[in-house]
Amino acid sequence: MRISDERLREETMTKMNEVAQPRISRRRAAATTVAGLTVAGAVLGAVWAWLAPPIHGVVALTKSGNRVKGYLGNEGDHFFIAAFLVVGMVSAVAVVAAVLVWKWRAHRGPVMAGALAIGSAAEAGVTAGVGAVLVHLRYGAVDIAGAPVSVEHRVHYVVEAPAVFFGHGPLQIAMTILFPAAVAAFVYALLAVSTQRDDLGAWPPEQEPVIGPPTTAESALPSAQ
């Protein structure tokens, strides 16, 4: 019985150590992760620019001769919806990327976790940048001073491009960029905690210490009388 338990333990350890040697270095794997997420950010920016709802408004001339800008109905809510769409899209990709990077078993470890966080932040920044440029090219900027309003035609309808951030403050911009990095790091940490090996099953595998069967009264050596 003891021999079969030891054999089963050895077979289990051998199976856990079965990880193929990677074809590329860990540094190159980290660079590939960052580059892949950056490219994904460019694609997300284009998709966001196509999906994000524009904001319909008016430029009106008041009785005092001043020009004012307003929004039709609840169109002002689209600023929040568009910015939230950016956060949701980059966070979803960050979760998928964390799982895929974890599946790259040979390179598991803090280096890939750092590359995942940096890549997710780059993804969010590129998504916001590409999205902002595309919607600006599509809708242009609202020129209040140049709006064709007059005493006879006091209202001019305009379409404003959606926003990629919740505000123009540096803290709001930083939170939008860093949020998917935190999501990706959190998911990767959960996956790391779930494994039973200290080396996370990465390459090179570390030999786990084999703990012998517990000592019982029957297997204990007789003491000197």
Image (cartoon, helix red, strand yellow):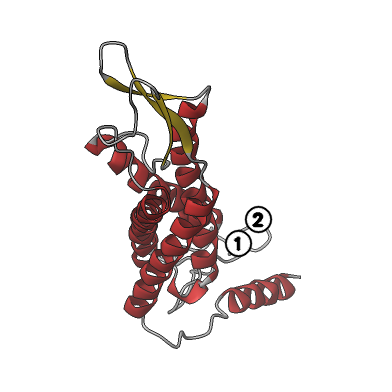
Residue 157 makes an appearance in the image: yes
- Between residue 149 and residue 75, name the one nearer to us: 149
Tell me which residue sits at (34%, 66%) in the image.
111
Tell me which residue sits at (36%, 67%) in the image.
34
Tell me which residue sits at (64%, 71%) in the image.
9
- Between residue 213 and residue 46, name the one nearer to us: 46
Q: Residues within 10 Å of mark 2 (few under 14, many from 20)?
A: few
Residue lying at the far top in this picture: please name it. Answer: 63
Residue corresponding to mark 1: 220
Residue corresponding to mark 2: 217
Q: Tell me the quarter of the picture where residue 87 sits.
A: top left
The quarter of the picture where the C terminus appears is: bottom right
The quarter of the picture where the N terminus appears is: bottom right
Above or below residue 192? Residue 166 is above
Give residue 141's position: percent from left, percent from top. Answer: 33, 43
- Between residue 8 and residue 121, name the one nearer to us: 121
